[in-house]
C-alpha cells in the first residue's frame, strides 16, 4: 500500500515554518507503522505556529493531523 503525507499551511506557512514537501510511504504486507521526519525551518519569534499533515491513500484524504511548532 502507498500513502502520501502532504503539509498544508495553518498560521505557519511553507518557506517560513516548514519546507513544503510530499512524502510517499510504502507499506509492506503486515507492516502497520512508519516513522517520518518533517523538517522545520529556523525562524525567530516567540510564538506558536501551526500547520497540518494530510494523509492520502489512493487519492482519498483519510486523516489530518494538527501540528504545533513553538519557539522561545
Image (spheres, grey):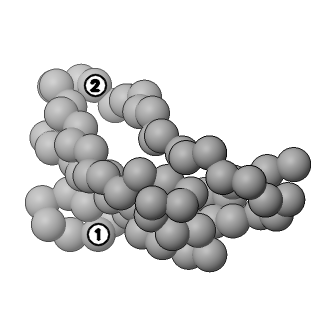
Front one among 34 and 40: 40
Q: Is residue 28 above or below residue 71?
A: above
Q: Quadrant of the N terminus?
A: top left
Q: Secondary structure at mark 1?
A: strand
16 horizontally vs 69: left or right? left
Which residue bears the numbered disc 1? 61
Q: Classify residue 45 by image quadrant.
A: bottom right
Task: Count residues near mark 1 (Cα–Cα under 10 Å), then give few for <14, some for 14-19, many for 20+.
Answer: few
Q: Classify residue 44 by image quadrant.
A: bottom right
Report if residue 34 is visible in the image: yes
- The CA span between labels 2 and 1 is 20 Å
Residue 11 placement (x, y as % from top left): 62, 75
Residue in view at x 14 percent, y 66 percent: 59
Task: Report the mark closest to the observer, 2 or 1.
Answer: 1
Q: Is residue 39 above or below residue 31?
A: below
Q: Classify residue 10 by image quadrant.
A: bottom right
36 horizontally vs 60: left or right? right
Which numbered circle lies on residue 31? 2
Residue in view at x 87 percent, y 49 percent: 72
Amino acid at each position: 500500500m502507498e500513502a502520501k503525507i502532504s503539509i498544508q499551511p495553518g498560521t505557519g506557512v511553507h518557506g517560513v515554518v516548514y519546507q513544503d514537501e510530499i512524502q510517499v510511504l510504502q507499506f509492506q504486507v503486515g507492516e502497520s507503522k512508519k516513522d517520518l521526519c518533517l523538517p522545520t525551518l529556523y525562524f525567530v519569534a516567540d510564538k506558536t505556529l501551526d500547520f497540518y499533515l494530510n494523509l492520502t491513500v489512493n487519492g482519498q484524504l483519510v486523516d489530518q493531523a494538527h501540528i504545533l511548532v513553538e519557539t522561545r
